[in-house]
Amino acid sequence: MNRKLSTLILASGLLAGAQANADDLLQWQNNSLTYLYGHDFKVDPEIQQTITFEHASGWSFGDLFFFTDVIKFNTDAQNGNGDGHTYYGEFSPRLSFGKITGADLSFGPIKDVLISATYEFGEKDVDAFLIGPAVDLDIPGFDYFQLNTYLRKPGSSRPGKNVWQITPVWSYTLPVGESDIVIDGFMDWVVDNDENRRGEYQANLHFNPQIKYDLGKALKWGEKQLYVGIEYDYWKNKYGIKDGGAVSEFVGPTDQNTASLLVKVHF
């Protein structure tokens, strides 16, 4: 694990110990498993099945989000590493200045001010470390809306300079009959680095919402437990590979525009 991230996690634990007893350290948590099936992916093989584990939790000093994807390529297709499968994940702790200090930092649409960090990990050279300021916003109708701003540092195995990334995260619930439709997701927008140097991480935009129907609530099994729907995935310059650039000559088009069928279980 990145040493800077380890230091941040340790600091989070020390701050938490100073602010709360063990009994009220963890305020809430939610875990889920998602199955996705989709096609027309770029760079990697076209047809993919994905199992995703997600964890989200609120703490007396901030919050934490973690996910990992295990991806299977259909038929005998392989990626550039010669594998018929791959994995990818992110570990994202955030420190809340409002929770740590006990002060009310809300003003206008801003509810809280935070420091957000993310460690990206996966097969080969995809690792990166991100850190920067964040705010939680109070936007009418939204269940939550986060705006994270990062300085993105590539892993030691991948060339390139530090670049800036903006990541909004949101959830919106629409009542439909006796159940709900939830629209949630994120957008990763790397706003600089347009230099087309072979192997460097390029400016890119990844827009990834899920549109889900609460089937568990409709069937009286319990709300917010079983969802069905689709995940839309638009990724301009996927993996930071410039579409039509030097590397794109070997991997093909890198602008991705696809959707996957989704089943999601919360526990």
Image (tube, rainbow, N blue to C red):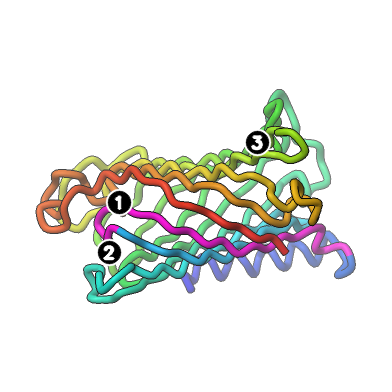
Q: Which residue lies furthest to the front in this view?
A: 219
The residue wearing badge 1 is 40
Task: Write down the residue under mark 3.
Answer: 172
Q: Residue 33 occupies which quadrant of the picture?
A: bottom right
Frontmost residue, 15 versus 245: 245
How far apart, in angstroms, are the residues tagged by discs 1 and 2?
27 Å
Locate residue 224 relative to residue 3 in the image: left or right.
right
Closer to the chain start, of discs 3 and 2, is: 2
Mark whose residue sits in front, 1 or 2: 1
- Residue at 87% from the left image edge and 62% from the top image edge: 24
> Label 1 amino acid?
Asp
Nearest the viewer among 74 and 246 is: 74
* Picture layout, residue 1 above or below residue 139: below
- Nearer the observer: mark 3 or 2; the answer is 3
Q: Is residue 44 magenta?
A: yes
Kind of residue at disc 3: Tyr
Q: Which of marks 3 and 1 is nearer the N terminus?
A: 1
Q: Could you say which is closer to the camera, residue 160 or residue 122?
A: 122
Q: Can residue 156 be seen in this view?
A: no
- Asked whether disc 1 touches disc 2, contact meaning CB atoms under 8 Å apart, the reply is no
Residue at image location 35% in from the left, 59% down from the top: 154
Q: At numbered mark 2, what does the secondary structure look like: helix, strand or loop?
A: loop
- Crowding at dot 3, Cα within 10 Å, few <14 / some 14-19 / many 20+, comes out as some
User: Which residue corresponds to mark 2?
Assistant: 158
Q: Is residue 91 left or right of residue 84?
A: right
Q: Where is residue 76 in the image (x, y as percent from the top left)?
A: 25, 74
Mark 3 and mark 2 in contact? Answer it, CB < 8 Å: no
Count the marks: 3
Report x, y in % for residue 111.
72, 35
Q: Position of residue 223 (x, y in %)?
A: 77, 50
Tag 1, which secondary structure? loop
